Amino acid sequence: MRARILLVVVLIVVAAACKLFLPSSPTIPVSSALVYPAFTNTAEYSPTAVSSATQTPLLSPTPQPAWEWQRSTPEEQGLSSAVLAGMLETMAQEKWNIHSILVVRHGVLVLEVYNHPFNSETRHSVYSVTKSITSSLVGIALNDGLLDDVNTPVISFFPSVTLDDPRKGSILVEHLLSMSSGIEWMEPLYSGLNDHWGILEADDPAAYFFNHALLYEPGTVFNYNSGGSHMLSMIIQKATDIPAAEFAAEKLFAPLDITDYSWEKDFTGHSKGGTGLELKPQDMAKIGQLYLNGGRWLGREIIPAEWISQSTATHSIPYDGMGYGYQWWIRPQGDYFALGWGGQQIRVFPEQDMVAVFTAGMSGNSILHNDLVDNYILPAVISDSPLPADSQAQARLQLAIDALGVPQEWLSKPLPPLAKEIDGKQWLVTGQGNWSMFALHFEGNDEAQFELTIENDPMLLMIGLDGIYRVTDTEELGPVALAGYWDNTDTFVIIQQNLREADRRTTRMHFNGNNVKLFSEWIVEPYHEESEAVLFGE
């Protein structure tokens, strides 16, 4: 599996005795105690009512239902369905590789859309959004008295490290949080010079970090540094005696009822501080709502409000028109966001009492989603109070959601003669890349089988030949979606999307006798590789 990690930079409607409990403090106008969603392309919604808190306690505990988002139409929360529909129509027309969009206003989920083949039940790698979660853990540890303050020298947590420059002793925890440590750091993705890979694979990650040259006085210059974020995770482990992922499970994820997640470790067993976290989009929205609520969830303080304020205030300047807090990006327009490679994003709009979540596989400045935010999501906010129902616009919005979630199946083309000729033959890959061997099986016009071996791990994957991805659950890569088509009589094209990842791979296979030319390209960080395969056993 090609790892690809970042560069640069969400019901239960709880009803009983007509009482409604929400995660946010504002009182939400609703038409009834149970609000059914109009705008989602997830599985059919089934509201769960639970008994009143005044009920006589049972003699034995009963399992509590999972917390779910309350849902409503956009108009019930003061948003325009027409504007949101326009956003999704543009997204489909432009074929933007956005995997999901969720919008929450006044604590209510008003838009949830998944672009085929993505869905609500599959975790998605959030890449550098992990940094913002790590920051929240620092705030919790400070509040619990496990850390003293952000002005603590980083070196004090790593006494075994010897500094080659005494000035490095003045690097503080705050400097790691604001990416202003002054340490020289480079993160070119497809390069052995990537320092992020270096620190994650080092025998002594702290020493690896401090062994880099000090280019600037700490606290003076922003320099994107995922290593500093990883150092924060290591500091959390030093302070709590457990990995950051375990600390998060207890202090952050459990209170928010986030149960399905994954968090990778480095070679020495530390939770990766700058990347490596997988979350469901609805759970990403919970994090955003928690920050919007000033760190409170269902009346309980999870993160201190003071830490929320400090984290989302500007402490360094990456470039004109953008601020950086404690692992959060801040716009002068008043919103702030956690940002991950490929366009994973949790965006918080305090003035609008709104949260938006994106998962995606975008590149360049498109990962910021500012066009969607400024041209559609913010303009969709019309009022703080409910708007009149707009059935025509709501129908248009639902149509746009359905079009993205369930694409039109096309009529499969007849298979060329070559499909029968190569059916079942094994091909040994001799060039670059992590594919070792593959075989194709064409049993009909609608679907094919793809035997693929990646670094000695064989797997059998299904390919949709009718425009509909076939999803195969694999132990090695998680759920893998494949679609394919014959571009001409001797060239077969496979489009591969691992549902937990941002990037999408397209591989063209040009068959010529006993040889195959393979040309693969990825879209998030534009990259391609050329390889060859030969017929195995002949």
Image (cartoon, helix red, strand yellow):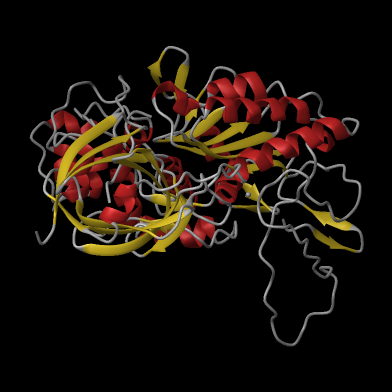
Tell me: residue 328, above or below residue 332. Answer: below
Tell me: residue 478, above or below residue 314. Answer: below
Q: Is residue 183 left or right of residue 470?
A: left
Residue 65 point in image, percent of width and height: 69, 68
Q: Is residue 392 left or right of residue 371?
A: right
Q: Is residue 361 left or right of residue 231?
A: right
Picture quarter with the C terminus: bottom left
Residue 274 point in image, percent of width and height: 34, 42
Front one among 372 and 272: 372
Furthest residue toward bottom: 59
Q: Residue at x 43, y 31 (%)?
A: 362
Front one among 340 and 525: 525
Front one among 47 and 459: 459
Furthest residue toward front: 417
Furthest residue toward top: 320
Q: Is residue 534 left or right of residue 334?
A: left
Residue 168 point in image, percent of width and height: 18, 32
Front one among 357 and 52: 357
Residue 1 point in image, percent of width and height: 27, 51
Res. 334 in view: no
Total marks placed: 0
**The image quarter in which residue 295 lies:** top right
Tell me: residue 201, above or below residue 170. Answer: below
Res. 89 in view: yes
